[in-house]
C-alpha cells in the first residue's frame, strides 16, 4: 500500500511528506529507491519525525553503503532489505529507533539520549582539562599512515576524537558510530572487533574498517576505543595501538577517571544554581548547542522533570520550539514561548543555540538576565563540557 501511495504521488511529479489520520501521523521520506515510512502518535513535530527517518536511512547506508543499496534495487525492484541486513543489521537499526524514541518502549537508554537526535549532535563526557590533555596525547601517539579517525567513547558520550586536518568527522557520522557500538553486547564481550562500515558523510559509497575495543581488561568496561582505517589488513597493528592507548591512559590516571565519570549521572541544575554566578531558581532545565563545536550539553532531568513522563513532555516542548525557530524565526535572536507549566526561551546566534525552561510566571527581563548568567556559567565550564577535536 505504501509503495503504491508513493508511486501515485510520484506520478504527479511530487513526493509524499505527511498524512494525518486521526491521532496518527504518517511521515514519508524518499531516498532514491528507498521509501521510509513512520507512523507516529507521539505528537512530535513532522520535521523531527522526518529527521529520525533520515538518521535511519544514513544508518542503513552505514551498513550497506549508498552504492550497495542502489545496486540491489537496480537488480530487483521491491527487494526485502531484511534478507541483506541480517539479524545484526536489523539490531543496529532497532537500536537507533530506540535511541530516538523518547517514550523508550524500545530502549533501555536514558531519555537524555534522545536529545542527541533532537540537536543532531553528540554530548561529551565532562572532564577536567588536564585529563582531556592526557587523552589527547594517548590518541595522537598511535598515528599510522592509513589511520583516519581515533575515537574514544564512554557510555555513548564522546571523550575525544582525532582526525586528519582535511577530513572532519561529521556529527551525524559520530552519532551513527555511537549507535553502532551500543547496538550489540558482543562488542563489549570481545577483546577487539574488526568490521567494515560506511561513514555516509565521509564517503557514502565506500567502506572504512573499524577496530572496536571496550577496555574491560583495564577495569574500564564502559570506555570504548574506535580506530578507523582505510586498510583492511591492520587488525593486529590496531590491536597493538589499542594496548598502547590503554597503557598510556592507565599510567596517567586518566582511564579510571573517565570510567568513574561515565558511571556518574550528568551534572544537575542544583550545581548550576549554586555556582558563584548566581544563575538563580527561575531556570528549571536547559539545552545548550555549540554551533562552532557541533556538540551539545544538558543537565540531568531533575525536579520538576525527574519522572519520565515530565521529562518526555519537556522534550516535546524542546522539539516544538526547535522546529519553530528553525522554520519561522530566522533573524530573531530571542524567542519566548509560553505554556501552563513552563516558559521556553530560545536564544540564538551564529555560535550557539540555547533552549531554556523557566518558571511559567518569569518576567521577560528576569528570564533574559537568568539566561545571561547561565551563558557566563557555560563559558566558564566550556573547556570541561566540550571537546576540541585534535588533528593528525
Image (cartoon, helix red, strand yellow):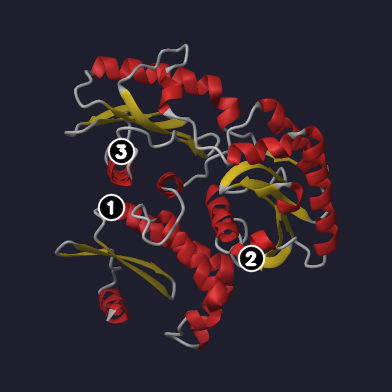
**In this figure, which residue is indicated by the disc labeled 3?**
325
Q: Position of residue 294 (x, y in %)?
A: 52, 39
User: Residue shown at 57%/51% (left/top)?
Assistant: 174
Residue 207 seen in the current view: no
Residue 118 seen in the current view: yes
Closer-to-camera residue (312/330) = 312
Question: Marks 2/1: CA distance?
Answer: 33 Å
Question: Marks 3/1: CA distance?
Answer: 15 Å
Q: Position of residue 156 (x, y in %)?
A: 56, 49
Which of disc 3 and disc 2 is earlier in sequence? 2
- State whether residue 368 is above or below residue 312: above
Question: Marks 2/3: CA distance?
Answer: 41 Å
Q: Mark 2 near mark 3, Cβ–Cβ under 8 Å?
A: no
Q: Quadrant of residue 329?
A: top left
**In this figure, which residue is indicated by the disc labeled 1?**
44
User: Residue shown at 28%/46% (left/top)?
Assistant: 309
Which disc number belongs to residue 186?
A: 2
Q: Secondary structure at mark 2?
A: helix
- State whether residue 190 is above or below residue 371: below
Q: Position of residue 385 (x, y in %)?
A: 56, 31
Q: Quadrant of residue 194?
A: bottom right
Q: Is residue 345 found left or right of 291 in the rendered image? A: left
User: Residue shown at 70%/31% (left/top)?
Assistant: 131
Amino acid at each position: 500500500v505504501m509503495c503504491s501511495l508513493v508511486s501515485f504521488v510520484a506520478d504527479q511529479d511530487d513526493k509524499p511528506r505527511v498524512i494525518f489520520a486521526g491521532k496518527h501521523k504518517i511521515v514519508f521520506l524518499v531516498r532514491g529507491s528507498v521509501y521510509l515510512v513512520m507512523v507516529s502518535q507521539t505528537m512530535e513535530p513532522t520535521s523531527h519525525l522526518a529527521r529520525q527517518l533520515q538518521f535511519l536511512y544514513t544508518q542503513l547506508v552505514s551498513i550497506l553503503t549508498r552504492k550497495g543499496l542502489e545496486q540491489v534495487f537496480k537488480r530487483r525492484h521491491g527487494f526485502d532489505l531484511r534478507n541483506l541486513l541480517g539479524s545484526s543489521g536489523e539490531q543496529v537499526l532497532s537500536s537507533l529507533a530506540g535511541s530516538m524514541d523518547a517514550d523508550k518502549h524500545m530502549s533501555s537508554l536514558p531519555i537524555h539520549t534522545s536529545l542527541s537526535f533532537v540537536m543532531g549532535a553528540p554530548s561529551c563526557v565532562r572532564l577536567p582539562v588536564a585529563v582531556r590533555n592526557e587523552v589527547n596525547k594517548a590518541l595522537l601517539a598511535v598515528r599510522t599512515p592509513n589511520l583516519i579517525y581515533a575515537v574514544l567513547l564512554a557510555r555513548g558520550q564522546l571523550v575525544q576524537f582525532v582526525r586528519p586536518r582535511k577530513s572532519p568527522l561529521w556529527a551525524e557520522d559520530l552519532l551513527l558510530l555511537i549507535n553502532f557500538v551500543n547496538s550489540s553486547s558482543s562488542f563489549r564481550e570481545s577483546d577487539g572487533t574488526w568490521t567494515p562500515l560506511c561513514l555516509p558523510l565521509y564517503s557514502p559509497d565506500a567502506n572504512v574498517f573499524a577496530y572496536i575495543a571496550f577496555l574491560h581488561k583495564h577495569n574500564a568496561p564502559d570506555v570504548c576505543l574506535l580506530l578507523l582505517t582505510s586498510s583492511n589488513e591492520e587488525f593486529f597493528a590496531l590491536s597493538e595501538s589499542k594496548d598502547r592507548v590503554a597503557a598510556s591512559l592507565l599510567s596517567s590516571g586518566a582511564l579510571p577517571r573517565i570510567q568513574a565519570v561515565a558511571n556518574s549521572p550528568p551534572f544537575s541544575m542544583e550545581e548550576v544554581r549554586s555556582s558563584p554566578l548566581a544563575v538563580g531558581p527561575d531556570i528549571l532545565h536547559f539545552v545548550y548547542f555549540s554551533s562552532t563545536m557541533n556538540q551539545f550539553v544538558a543537565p540531568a532531568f531533575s525536579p520538576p522533570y525527574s519522572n519520565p513522563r515530565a521529562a518526555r513532555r519537556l522534550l516535546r516542548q524542546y522539539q516544538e520550539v526547535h522546529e519553530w525557530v528553525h522554520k519561522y524565526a530566522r533573524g530573531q535572536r530571542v524567542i519566548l514561548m509560553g505554556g501552563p507549566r513552563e516558559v521556553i526561551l530560545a536564544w540564538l546566534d551564529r555560535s550557539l543555540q540555547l533552549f531554556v525552561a523557566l518558571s511559567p510566571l518569569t518576567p521577560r527581563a528576569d528570564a533574559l538576565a537568568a539566561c545571561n548568567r547561565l551563558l557566563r556559567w557555560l563559558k566558564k565550564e566550556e573547556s570541561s563540557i566540550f571537546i576540541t577535536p585534535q588533528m593528525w
